[in-house]
Every structure is written in structure tokens, then in C-alpha cells.
Image: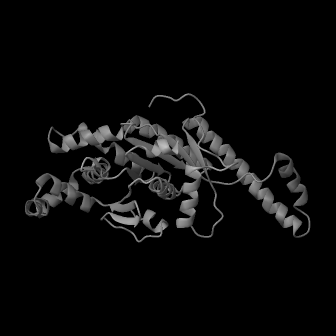
Amino acid sequence: MPSALLDRRLVVVTGKGGVGKSSVAAALAVLAARAGKRVLVCEVNAQERVAPLLGAPPAGPTVRAARPGLHTVDVTPAEAMREYGLMILRFRAVYEAVFENRLVRHFLRVVPSLGELVMLGKILHEARAEVRGRPRWDLVVLDAPSTGHCVQLLRVPGAMLGTVPPGPLRSDALWMRDWLVDPARTALALVTLPEEMPVTEAIELDAALRAQVGLAPAALVVNAMPPARFSAAEAARLPGLADGPPPLGPAARAGRLQAVRAEASAREAARARAALDLPTTLLPLLASPTFGAPEVERLADVLGAPGPGEPAWLAPAAPGRAP
């Protein structure tokens, strides 16, 4: 399943804030780069996370290599507007005369959703760009904003089609909408933690994406899954050992807490699978005091080749449903 996901030209990674979607986006990019793909990771007007996670400095609004085969960029409204203006007007002097005009800049600032449209246009332009007959990037990974902001960003082209008269802006909105909803080109991965609120929000996000964008998520990633260290019989013995003297008593209490958390996480992961009916991977909770390039590599290992006993990409729990 990861290889099928990475065969698309654009993979959108989103979920509730704090669930680790930037880590998952970085791990997917590393996995693709290992396979020899040329990869670009786009963040959207944010404090950059992906490049530092890979041990590289932030790229800013200019595409920059984070490691061989893997580049990053932070797409901002101002830089995206500049590139869009240059693409339309062709000449820098004409662009500066038009787009840098004070009255024009004021007008552009008040056009609803124009900033989101040009940022999304920049990302999609990178995804479809070709150089000498081959894609500039084999894969573009979009580390998208969280939940509601992601829906707002992705629905802009469709919303523009209902409000903008025929012309260049409408034409751009049309091809952007078509790219986003084409499952052969675009895939979306939902990321969640195995906890009640993130799972509930992932279920709501899935419904909003289908209803408001026309985009059916292609995969579910349950991040930071604690391991099930105890069998049912072992877990049942832990409470009786918890009042014992050290070191057995404290170890039993810690084990009891871990068993309870693992059980609750398994329950939430099962709820997410049942509700979302998507190919699913469970990423392990990593016992590390910091999170950086080694941890991203570990997540990429799990995404690419789950080992014995590790959760693998799971088939949908039931026959697929229509978007």
C-alpha cells in the first residue's frame, strides 16, 4: 500500500493538530527518496517542521535540498502571488508595474481566498511541472494544515468555479480542482493518534473532504501506537503485584499503566478503522527523548517494510465505499 500511495504525483498529509502529520509527511518523503524518486515536500505558510526533522535548515519560500533527492519549501501567499503574477505576465517589469502597484495590492488582499488559491496553485504547479518531457518531481508531499484549515484550502478551487467569471483565474481553478479529485494523481493520507478526540476529528475530516472537496482519503495512519507488552493473563496479574516492595511493586504499577494505555489505544485504532474503512498503518510510539532524523528514518522503515510482529498496512475492514 505505501508504494501505491507513493505512485501518485501528489500526496496530501493532514489530520488534527499535534498528531504528528509533519513526521509522517517527512517519513513518506524519505521512503520515496530511498526508492530513487525526486521528492518535494511543501509546507503551507507555517513554521517549518519537515526540514529540521531531517536535520536540514528551514528552506523558506525557495525550494532547497534537505538531503539527496529530497527538497523542501515553505509556500507563502506573497511568494506564491509573485510567482503566479510572473507566470501570467511573463516579464518582471510588467509584473512589478501591475502587482506591486499599491492599489492593486490592496485589491488583491481583499479578494476572498485568493491567497489560498495561489498557494495551492504553486503546489499543484510543482506537482504537474515537467522538464524535458519528464516530471520535475516524481512526488510532491503536501504537509497540509490541520483539519478545518485543510478543508478550507482544498475546497478553494471548487468554490472559485462557482463565483469567478470565465478567464485565467477560472481556468486555473478548474485544472486545480480536477487534479485534486483525480485519484490517479492525488492521494490523501489521514493521520491520527489512537486517542478519542483525534480519532473523532479524523472521522469528521474524512466526511468533510468527501462532501466539500470531492476528495476521498486513500489511507489512514495511526501514529504513536503503544505496543501491547502483556498478554491478557499477564495484565490480569499486574494489579495484584502493584502493592509489592521495590522493584517489583513500582514495575507492576508502571506495567499496569502501560497495559491500560495500550488497550485504550487498540480500542481507538479499531474504532478509526471501522469508521473510515481505509488501508491503515500503525506507526509505533518511539521511546526517544528527542525526535529528529533517526526517528523519521525509523518511521520510514515501518511504512516501507513492517517487520515480524509489527502492524503492517492493513486491508480495508470492509469493501470500499464510493467517495
Residue 322 in the image, given as x and y percentages of width and height: 46, 28
Residue 292 seen from this side: no
Residue located 48% across and 40% down the image = 218
- Of 42 and 159, the residue lying toward us: 42
Q: Indicate left or right for 319 with 287 as reference.
A: left
Q: Is residue 215 above or below residue 239?
A: above
Is 142 on the left or on the right of 297, as rendered?
Answer: left
Q: Residue at x 88, y 52 (%)?
A: 237
Which colour assignment does the render follow? one colour
Q: Quadrant of residue 286?
A: bottom right
Question: Is 151 positioned to the left or the right of 248 in the image?
Answer: left
**Quarter containing the C terminus:** top left
Residue 249: give x, y in percent of width and height: 87, 65
Q: Is residue 286 visible?
A: yes
Counting labels gives 0
In the rendered view, does 207 fall on the left or right side of 227?
Answer: left
Q: Splitting the image into 4 quarters, where does residue 229 fall?
A: bottom right
Pinpoint residue 319: horizontal percent, then vertical percent.
56, 28
Q: What residue lies at 46% left-to-right and 50% top-to-bottom?
A: 14
- Depth check: give the residue in front, 122 or 205: 122
131, 162: nearer the viewer: 131
Residue 127, x across and y down, in percent: 32, 49
